[in-house]
Amino acid sequence: MNSFFTRYPILLSLVLAALLLSGLALRFYDLTDQPIDFHPTRQLRGAIIARGMYYEMLPTADPALREQAVSFWYSTGQYEPPIVEKLVAYTYLLAGGEYLWLSRIFTSIFWIIAGLALFDLARRLATRAAWGSALIATAYFLFLPFAVQASRSFQPDPGMVMLIVLAVNLLYRWSEKPSWKWAVLAGIFAGSAVLVKVVALYIIGGAAVALVLYTLGIKRFWRSPQVWAMLILTLAPAAIYYLGRGGRASEFFNSWTLSLSHLLLQPSFYARWLSTVEGLAGLGALLAALVGVLIAQPRPRVLLIGLWAGYAIYGLFLPYQMTTHNYYHLQLIPIIALSLVPVLDAIRERISQQKWVWQAAFIAIVCVGLAFSAMLSVNEQKQENHRVEPAYWQEIASYLPTDGKILALTQDYGYRLMYYGWRKVNLWPNRGELNVAQLRGSEKGFEEYFAKRAEDKSYFLITAFNQFRDQPDLQEYLEQNYPVVAEGVGYLIYDLLHPLQ
């Protein structure tokens, strides 16, 4: 296969282009559906931020509507710089309207760029310029159903993965031939990745430490100005941004690492972590990737060990998210894809010694696997239709009282109601938040907690009925103490101002 690509390089370009375009087409399928298919809380948060930015910049916007959109934007909080949201907002201005599906175009293209960079790195990891191995690894990265679904979502993670792959590619080039060009470029892309989402530092840091020590040794690396330049360029952008935001970083560390560190002592945590990864990436691919680390050549093995070590440390610092938020594993997909290269290379070498009929059979098997993955991705999107969401939430919003504050147990932290219905409510915690409070040891007595949350509120709205049934204390307390003032398909409103006698 490799000699064939070497003889006909145009064919390699065509196959790679076909893979990239097919990956893009999978992500563009059902492009205009509402972003409820994958972690709607994160996607709608991005939509609210982008809309606020759009209305703030739109000269013809109604002043009252602009003020409301901007206030909704600021009410979401800011976890990382809203870079992709700003890009989408500018695109709204150019397009002449708020077309939410434009966000999918950006994030999908980010993933395709990452795929191109991953192919370039994969062929460097393979022996004898093994184009076939690099192509199959890239195909896994592009066609894995989880990757398709997650990489088209409106959140910073697809852009972060793109920048991680680009940075690691450049770090590897620097390791092969240290120069200021590769050092500066690697530092710029690494710093951009960490700025987009600070957790990128774990993966990039693992790769950088491994490659720097392999290239320069433990006694020489600290004397290299190129290493210091990469370090400064990697850390400076995020440091400037987060230090300007006060104690947000330390608050996040205390809330999600220190207070939940006891989970690391539970064997069940590691079983759930492994089960999550197996469900997303496939057990066969995961095991083959780990074998790939063992049989890789020295420099590729060092890189792969660094990437896996970075991912492992990342998971230990965020134990709760590892088993509850599957998109936190998105940066694992390029690690697995790269780790498959040595295994694919060994298979390719064996296949290349066989007769042409067996080589053709191998290619057919690979093509069937890709077609099956593509079919799974399309079927997932076919099965879900969320185009009724805007009208549904606008209808619920029209029934909400306007003469007092509303406490609500509702979907996605109230973002569906806020984005589609232009109504903001105060939130009652869902089951997940209550579980986190319990894990942190900060849960309170129900009646005391209810009184505090319901203070100065006039109504209690229920739209998340599964969550309502999961909280029998709340259900019983409301039914026994407060009258229902409105009820319809998908909503229930209690009157908190006039308790039952």
Image (tube, rainbow, N blue to C red):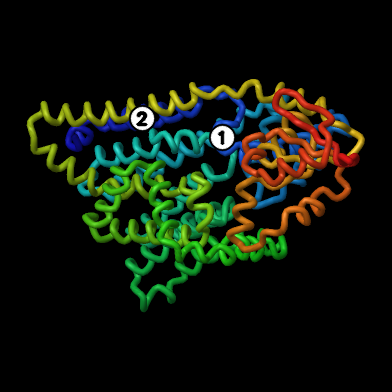
* Residue 106: mark: 1
Q: Position of residue 338 (x, y in %)?
A: 33, 48
Residue 473 visible here: yes
Q: Residue at x 44, y 62 (%)?
A: 266
Q: As rendered, which of 273 and 96 lies closer to the eye?
A: 273
**Which amino acid does the dot numbered 2 rest on?**
Ser
Q: Residues within 10 Å of mark 1 (few under 14, many from 20)?
A: some
Q: As rendered, which of 273 and 337 lies closer to the eye?
A: 273
Kindly give the residue lying farthest to the front in the view shown: 501
| Gap in angstroms between the C-alphas marked 1 and 2 | 22 Å
The quadrant the C terminus occupies is top right
Q: Earlier in the sequence, mark 1 or mark 2?
A: 1
**Which amino acid does the dot numbered 1 rest on?**
Phe
Q: SS for tag 2?
A: helix
* Residue 373: mark: 2
Q: Position of residue 359 (x, y in %)?
A: 14, 31
- Label 1 or label 2, whichever lies nearer to me, is 2
